[in-house]
Amino acid sequence: FRYDSKTEAALLLNTTFRNQGRPGSFLSIDAKLSTDLLFEGQYFTRTGFRRRIGFRWHLVHAQQSIDQFTGESRIARQRIYSTFGETFLGTIFSNKLTIGGGLRLEYTRTVPTIAPVEYEPENDGLIIFFSTLTVDTYDKTNYPTSGTYLKLSAEKASRKIVSERDFARVFLDARFANSLAPKLTLLSSIFIGNAIDDVPFHYQFMLGGQNMPFTFLGERNSFLGFRPQEFQNNNVEFLQMGFQFEIFPKQYLIVRGNVGNTFDKFSIKLSPNSFFYGGGATLGWDSRFGPIEFTASASERHSLITHLNVGFYF
């Protein structure tokens, strides 16, 4: 169970079956019940070639609402209905390193729920080739004190192979935790992404909010001081740094500052005027029921934004 002041209450149901079909394989079925629905099945099996290399078959149906802004004003909300299946070959049985590639077949319907009259529903049938590299050496999932999380992803769709759009997307998500003292940790993160050609709405990058993914169905991330999905475009640059203090056992104070923006065209921006700045403080408790956190943040656009999370992230 999880409560989030953006997405409200959510319940995750999971069933796992081991040694189904082949020794060492397993089947995982998840259902996330909330305003953002998710039904997911994954089957992992070894190739027999190398111990850590295997196939993953992945089937997902997801529903999620995405807001669109002009400046500080929300101009639209669109509901994404996405169903996709993918196959992936790589080092799926390694706890620290995942590297490989695969093929994704996807059908998505985008429906305006709050929008001007010129917004119309869109349907996309996509065939996407993708590759990914993920490194995770964090010592803990929540409130890490050392280690690195790094994900490099590349995707390509082409009309030459039946897909309804030509586009490509690549992004780097890098996060670091460095212990400065027994109770003090330096946190830093960088997110850079580039998408080109006829990019679908839900493949654009989104910045803003606490524990909101920068990509559709991506890893949770935070752009403090701004509303969820306040910035959206084909290119993104983001930097965050902060400190994590363990003020009492399993109780933390996290202070962070961030800078970032989304852009129509990709280029490394050096001018301070190209970015928006924000920051905030989080009080967190690593409880047996998952993180319990209250965050207060502010920016040049917003004087105060608060956020509450209760429970494990999923």
Image (cartoon, rainbow, N blue to C red):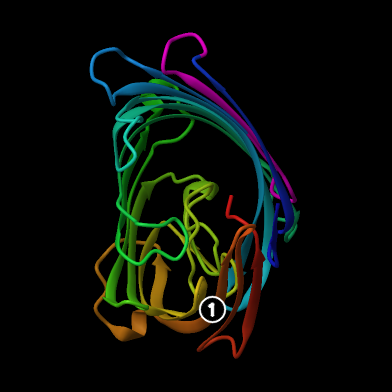
At x 50%, y 83%, the residue is 280
At x 50%, y 74%, the residue is 249
For residue 30: magenta?
yes
- How many other residues sit within 10 Å of disc 1, few (<14), some (14-19) or many (≥20)? some
Where residue 161 sits, quadrant-wise, is top left
| Circle 1: residue type | Thr
Report the residue marked by disc 1.
282
Against 174, is 75 above or below?
below
Left or right relative to 188: residue 49: left
Closer to the camera, 72 or 304?
304
In magenta, the rendered stretch is 20-39
For residue 267: magenta?
no
Against 290, is 276 above or below?
below
Where residue 296 sits, quadrant-wise, is bottom right
Left or right relative to 89: residue 72: right
Against 301, is 109 above or below?
above
| Residue at the outermost top position | 21
Closer to the camera, 193 or 61?
61
Q: Position of residue 25 (x, y in %)?
A: 45, 18
Q: Position of residue 50 (x, y in %)?
A: 23, 19
At x 74%, y 49%, the residue is 34
Which element type, helix, strand or loop, lies under badge 1?
A: strand
Left or right relative to 166: residue 247: right
